[in-house]
Amino acid sequence: MHEAPLTPLLRLSGVHKRYGATVALSDVSLELHAGEVVALVGENGAGKSTLVKILTGVVPLDEGTITMQGALQCFRSAQNAQAAGILAVYQETVMFEELSVTENIFVGRHQMRGPFIDWPTMHVQAQAVLDGMGARITASKLVKDLSLAERHLVEIARALSQKALVLILDEPTAALSQAEIQDFFGLVRRLRDQGVGVLFITHKFDEIFALADRYVVLRDGIAVGTGRIADASEGALVQLMAGRTIDQMYPRIQSMPGDTVLRVRQLSHPTEFSDLQFDLRRGEILGFYGLVGSGRSEAMLAIMGLNLQASGALEVLGRPLNVKCPGDAIAAGIAYVPEERQRQGAILSFSVQNNISLPGLDRFAWGPWLSDLKESTLCQRMVERLRIKTASPHTPVSGLSGGNQQKVVIAKWLGLNPGIVILDEPTKGIDVGAKQAVYQLIAEMVRDGLAVILVSSELPEVMNLAHRIIVMRRGLQVAEFTGTHTRAEAILAAASGLGGVNPSAGGVLEPVRNTVADMTT
């Protein structure tokens, strides 16, 4: 850690924020010095998002003060915060898809040459920022043609182009590959060396210990701990976050795979994947692992009828299935929980009840009317079963924590009583306690006879939960591993193309430890 100047770059003192009777933040204080990275740690619902909204001028604080370089600030809008030098990069990208990368980087602050927008200069500057990040993205490309990982890099470039004094990074690596994450770490370190103060929010402990100089832990809107990362441990941070120890992250999977319920043959797409072949059995968790761009999610979309250029043969319970639209897959008993819950999984402005009942509205209909009693009965059953924390069934999903939003997305499909559930990155962007709850739910699904496809970038996740693991690389199914004693190095080698891997070899080596540390590596 670099020697910090006496006057903090950013200081929050005694910050309070209430929403009606709900106390979101209570007497929170925080300091961030120039040239340091502070990790803001806490479970979903701890108050991190509210704190970021206050810092970025989205919502006003009720009590307390904010100073920048010793000067008292009053942020009445996002523009005020940006003018003071505070910018944020969020987990969920918010971009104009029909505009170019350059237009997105300079949105709201076009450079002018006389009465005209100076597009050539902006293109040059945007490309320079992207090149300096090591991002292989052309500034003139339309955002709609970018991958999810590339969109996150453009968000980072937009913030860097504004020469922020304080940069807030909210789960910025969620959609990046390992190589891109390492490049991103290098970017953050260069910014720190240039005197930028970085407030870093992540649920991945390896990132905290790799980047942060200090930490601040929030729990229930209160700052419950702060200190130097060098003096901290994963276990101590988890205990501060949750108010309890979490020793066993992964549940025992008490299920033996039974008969085949899904058979996939020669599933192909002109550009995304080719010749995928696998079977899924009742009571089985089939893991799909691969780096960003491997084609895993695209293959799942094809099974659901959301990738119309795909071809191949599907069988459900021994019967051929011709999927032309999602309705065909749903009718066959297949449910799909997408990677981007806020864009694809839920309608955030709708209530918990309306989201849960949405896939099966025909079951609640009596002529042109819906039965509120039937809807509320299903909602209450799912809220209790999945232990969804919500003040009311009528609370908008946008008002829930990330972990509870994910539970709502899962609940709406379980309400249809499917036989097959596809979970694409089910724990992306949720905290330790919420992850444990989702893992327990997956274990309960297969115990009850459901078949689960688990797509995940978290290697310990698939290693500790899946009965079998299929590895994909560049659209190809390159390896399959079975058993509980699979070697992590062999899976990574298959996913990255390093060394020769026998696609049918599972390998028998030491098991992955069933701990919090494994979950966060």
Image (cartoon, grey):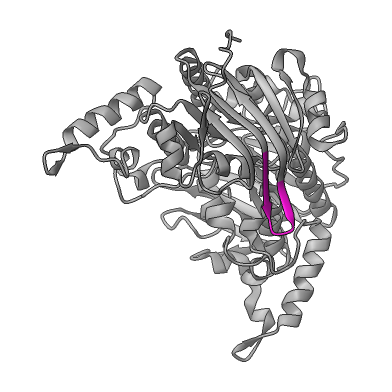
In front: 444, or 37? Answer: 37
Q: Does 198 sit above or below residue 400? A: above
Q: Position of residue 495 (x, y in %)?
A: 57, 28
Q: Position of residue 322 (x, y in %)?
A: 53, 65
Q: Is residue 97 left or right of residue 71?
A: left
Q: Is residue 118 left or right of residue 52?
A: left
Measuring 65% from the left and 23% from the top, which residue is drawn there? 208
Residue lying furthest bottom in this view?
A: 367
Residue 391 shows in this picture:
yes
- Picture mark count: 0
Measuring 81% from the left and 56% from the top, which residue is drawn there? 387
- Stretch of the chain drawn in magenta: 15-24
Membership of 237 in magenta stretch? no
Q: Position of residue 239 (x, y in %)?
A: 83, 30
Residue 150 shows in this picture:
no
Classify residue 200 by image quadrant. top right
Measuring 58% from the left and 12% from the top, which residue is drawn there? 4
Classify residue 496 by image quadrant. top right
Tell me the quarter of the image containing the N terminus.
top right
Q: Position of residue 82 (x, y in %)?
A: 42, 37
Q: Main secondary structure of the magenta part?
A: strand
Tell me the quarter of the image containing the C terminus.
top right
Membership of 22 in magenta stretch? yes
Q: Does 516 sit above or below residue 343? A: above
Q: Does 193 sit above or below residue 373? A: above
In front: 510, or 503? Answer: 510
Q: Does 21 sit above or below residue 442? A: below
Classify residue 31 by image quadrant. top right
In front: 71, or 157? Answer: 71
In front: 296, or 242? Answer: 242
